[in-house]
């Protein structure tokens, strides 16, 4: 039926088309196996079928099959199944059968039977192959490229799948050639066969991701578009999109069978690609990772089914071991670099998502707070009068004082201790009297209390700063302290006070650098001074 429809569309009689086949039979014979003409039982019964010779029967069979295939190539459109007078599910099976290895017809035969029209037979064949998921809608380079004359339809499909754009390495036939550059384009050394076993490494997606290798889609579906780029926090393996559906197994196995034909000299591009994918996909988790990165588009079923599919497809494959060896070497280089893997582990553990980042910073804050608690546990703030010290500095010196708690009980407590120290029969060093006298020498006005309160030295639970200042002035009345007790401390303070350079530096620091607004005002004044100087200069030396 389909052959008749095609012949009717050519406006050429069947006899004329048959004559073309007969005239070119000698050139077509080498394209078939010898058994077709000598040992096929079907053709030995040619007389029963009404043919004059086996060659006559074969030529008519080639005519019918060739015309039927050309009709399929022209009109098999999944969105227009009515043109083939079949349902969509039947049309899918027809299109699959047209690509089976055992059903292939030589391109030369199709060329002889093709009607002389403006439509190019190669373009018709490419159009038929567009529905097999080997190119994205955005990337149609595979189908717009020029290919040499194929052996048959399956050969053209393989060439389209393994096509490399001109920027990549291709052989004279446009077939896939092993990459010799990767990532930044650095040249790779040829790998000798005896070294290949040591250099080829098989690691699945889960292992590679744990080692800090991220996966990214190349946004194409060409097996040639695989690349690897090294990085410190993570390296990146770019893979083409992989569409897996109900036709994938049949399509891939058919191409593998073609590559493994004894009389087909090729680079095992499909076998090597499937073997490489199988080395990455061992478990359903590997499929899940690729699916989440939009690399693997699963229209087959569960992740388990896809993993099983790849493990099955690669059974008994003999790939070209040198095809992806440089890629594997780069992956192995990352994998064996402990610094990279440790950095990647840290990045993936603590910075892979917002919640991990928040948890990491929360842990850091907790650690810092624990450190601060430990520090103050070892160096606690004291309230001992003995813990007074002084350290000299250029821009400012530091007087360390113990905490002073002032509340309603302070006056009674201190006065009671002073009275005890002043008992005639109590021999002591007047420690409390000396301490209170020293504090009174520091505190004269409410402003002094305010300074100590702001530095968290004086904890005021009594009342106003005036009340605290009055309290210390009252407590020190008629005291007789030990004058030598704080003499060294007073001498250090006096030394700083009399050193003009220190006091001037301290004055400048406190005036112009004590807070951000003072710093801004200082720099604004300097800029204003410089601009005033420039204006004065040009006022005295005006330009001509």
Image: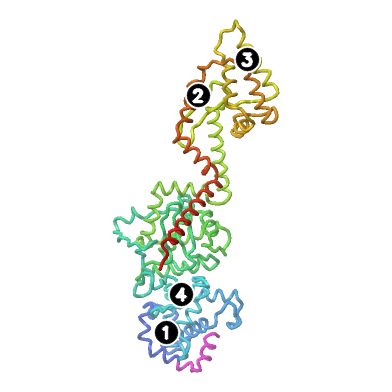
Q: Position of residue 403 (x, y in %)?
A: 59, 26
The residue at 30%/59% (across/down) is 191
Indicate whether 215 appears above or below 342.
below
- Tell which tag, 2 or 4, sits nearer the viewer: 2
Question: What scheme was used to colour the molecule?
Answer: rainbow
Camera-side residue of 50 and 110:
110
Q: Position of residue 121 (x, y in %)?
A: 45, 84
Q: Position of residue 254 (x, y in %)?
A: 46, 69
Left/right of residue 417 with respect to residue 238 in the rendered view: right
Please say whether residue 333 is visible from this viewpoint. yes
Q: Whole-Å distance between the Cαs marked 3 and 1?
A: 124 Å
- Tell which tag, 3 or 1, sits nearer the viewer: 3
Q: Whole-Å distance between the Cαs marked 2 and 4?
A: 89 Å
The image's mark for residue 418 is 3
Please say whether residue 318 is visible from this viewpoint. no
The image's mark for residue 41 is none
Pointer 1 local density, CA inside 10 Å: few below 14, some 14–19, many at least 20? many
Q: Quadrant of the C terminus?
A: bottom left
Q: Whole-Å distance between the Cαs marked 4 and 1?
A: 27 Å
Pointer 4 local density, CA inside 10 Å: few below 14, some 14–19, many at least 20? some
Q: Find out whether residue 10 is within the magenta segment.
A: yes
Task: Name the residue that disc number 4 marks.
Answer: 141
Secondary structure beneath label 3: helix
- Residue range of the region highlighted in magenta in the rendering: 1-16
Q: Quadrant of the N terminus?
A: bottom right
Task: Name the residue that disc number 2 marks.
Answer: 490
Q: Position of residue 42 (x, y in %)?
A: 45, 80
Asked which quadrant contains residue 230, the reply is bottom left
Secondary structure beneath label 1: helix
Task: Name the residue that disc number 1 marks.
Answer: 109
- Tell which tag, 4 or 1, sits nearer the viewer: 4
The numbered mark, 4 or 3, whose residue comes first in the sequence reads 4
């Amino acid at each position: 039926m389909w052959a008749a429809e095609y012949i009717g569309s050519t406006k050429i009689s069947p006899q004329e088309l048959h004559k073309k086949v007969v005239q070119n039979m000698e050139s077509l014979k080498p394209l078939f196996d010898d058994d077709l003409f000598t040992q096929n039982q079907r053709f030995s019964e040619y007389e029963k079928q009404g043919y004059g010779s086996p060659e006559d029967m074969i030529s008519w069979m080639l005519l019918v099959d060739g015309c039927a295939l050309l009709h399929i190539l022209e009109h098999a459109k999944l969105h227009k199944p009515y043109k083939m007078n079949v349902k969509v599910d039947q049309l899918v099976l027809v299109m699959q059968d047209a690509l089976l290895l055992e059903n292939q017809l030589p391109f030369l035969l199709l060329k002889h039977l093709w009607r002389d029209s403006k439509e190019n037979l190669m373009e018709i064949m490419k159009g038929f192959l567009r529905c097999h998921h080997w190119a994205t809608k955005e990337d149609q380079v595979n189908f717009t490229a020029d290919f040499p004359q194929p052996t048959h339809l399956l050969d053209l499909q393989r060439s389209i799948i393994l096509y490399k754009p001109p920027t990549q390495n291709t052989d004279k036939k446009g077939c896939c050639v092993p990459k010799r550059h990767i990532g930044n384009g650095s040249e790779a050394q040829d790998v000798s066969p005896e070294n290949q076993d040591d250099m080829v490494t098989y690691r699945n997606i889960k292992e590679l991701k744990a080692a800090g290798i991220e996966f990214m889609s190349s946004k194409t579906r060409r097996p040639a578009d695989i690349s690897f780029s090294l990085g410190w926090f993570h390296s990146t393996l770019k893979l083409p999109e992989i569409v897996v559906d109900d036709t994938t197994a049949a399509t891939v196995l058919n191409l593998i069978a073609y590559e493994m034909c004894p009389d087909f000299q090729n680079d095992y591009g499909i076998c090597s690609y499937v073997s490489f994918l199988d080395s990455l996909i061992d478990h359903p988790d590997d499929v899940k990772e690729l699916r989440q990165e939009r690399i693997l588009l699963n229209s087959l079923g569960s992740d388990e089914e896809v993993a099983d599919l790849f493990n099955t497809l690669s059974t008994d494959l003999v790939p070209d071991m040198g095809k992806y060896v440089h890629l594997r070497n780069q992956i192995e280089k990352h994998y064996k670099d402990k610094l990279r893997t440790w950095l990647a582990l840290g990045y993936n553990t603590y910075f892979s998502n917002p919640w991990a980042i928040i948890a990491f910073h929360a842990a850091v804050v907790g650690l810092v707070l624990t450190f601060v608690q430990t520090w103050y546990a070892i160096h606690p703030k004291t309230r001992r009068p003995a813990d007074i010290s002084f350290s000299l500095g250029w821009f400012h010196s530091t007087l360390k004082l113990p905490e002073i708690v002032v509340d309603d009980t302070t006056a009674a407590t201190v006065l009671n201790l002073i009275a005890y120290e002043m008992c005639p029969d109590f021999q002591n060093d007047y420690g409390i009297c000396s301490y209170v006298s020293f504090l009174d020498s520091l505190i004269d006005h409410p402003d002094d209390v305010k300074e100590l309160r702001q530095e968290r030295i004086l904890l005021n639970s009594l009342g106003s700063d005036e009340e605290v200042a009055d309290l210390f002035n009252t407590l020190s009345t008629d005291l007789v302290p030990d004058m030598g007790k704080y003499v060294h401390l007073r001498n250090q303070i006096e030394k700083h006070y009399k050193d003009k350079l220190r006091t001037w530096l301290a004055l400048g620091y406190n005036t112009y650098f004590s807070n951000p607004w003072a710093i801004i005002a200082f720099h604004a004044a300097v800029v204003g001074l410089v601009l005033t100087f420039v204006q004065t200069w040009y006022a005295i030396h005006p330009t001509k």
